[in-house]
Amino acid sequence: MELSVYKIDGTESGKKVVLDEKVFGVTPNDHVIYLDVLQYLANQRQGTAKTKDRSEVAYSTKKLGRQKGGGGARHGSIKAGIFVGGGNVHGPKPRDYRFKLNKKVKSLARVSALSYKAAEGKIVFVEPFTMDAPKTKELLTILSNIKAGDRKVLFVLPENSNNIYLSSRNLPQVKVISVDEINTYAIMDAHSLVLVDGVQDILAARVK
């Protein structure tokens, strides 16, 4: 697949980019995409949810009534879960939700997601550029010029650019990351991808 590289004013630069088949042309594997997205979301969880069980509730330990002859069920403590204010039964405890995935699985998931976007025509290439200062309006103009769309856009840079990142921070539909930060979740969550020329070569070099 061959795509044109645009200037930030929206005109074609005259350069064409040939997408590497091993990155943008593989047969997508939906299951590995699911696993990689699941791992990403699991890794974001703090895992600090906690409730008190009957051993941790601060109440009297006195037995409520006689064991037999009371005419009702036997109760040993007001801390039991059936009483209001009693301990929580089988409540959440702090835990680590993270799990590991094979590197080849994560790599296949990433190229599968990129291949989906390429097949859908949701990838736009733009010439490398810099911004002298953070200007949200200027970044919006660039996105409008290259027709990146008004839905979620993932802007991928060859390396970190603080001014471009700060320019996007007030735009909820735009996310700017470097190629080192690209992941399956970010790709699938975006409606379209804007790749700065050179990113494709870095991605191709990392696929084994």
Image (cartoon, rainbow, N blue to C red):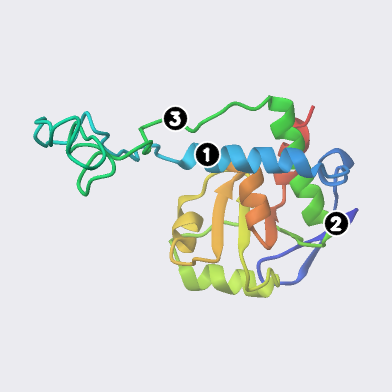
Provide residue 86's location: percent of width, then percent of height: 22, 42
Residue type highlighted by circle 2: Ala
CA distance separating discs 3 and 1? 9 Å
Sequence-wise, the earlier of marks 3 and 2 is: 3
Disc assigned to residue 119: 2
128 displayed left or right of 42 = right
Q: Nearer the viewer, residue 131 or 120?
A: 120
> Which residue corresponds to mark 3?
96
What element does badge 1 sit on?
helix
CA distance separating discs 3 and 2? 37 Å
Question: At 61% from the left edge and 50% from the top edge, which residue is drawn?
Answer: 186
Residue 5 sits in which quadrant?
bottom right
Provide residue 179's location: percent of width, then percent of height: 63, 42
Nearest to viewer (mark 3 / mark 2):
3
Q: Is residue 157 visible?
A: no
CA distance separating discs 2 and 1? 28 Å
Question: At 51% from the left edge and 57% from the top edge, which residue is drawn?
Answer: 164
> Which residue corresponds to mark 1?
42
Residue type highlighted by circle 1: Ala
What element does badge 2 sit on?
helix
What element does badge 3 sit on?
loop
Provide residue 58's location: percent of width, then percent of height: 12, 36
Residue type highlighted by circle 3: Asp
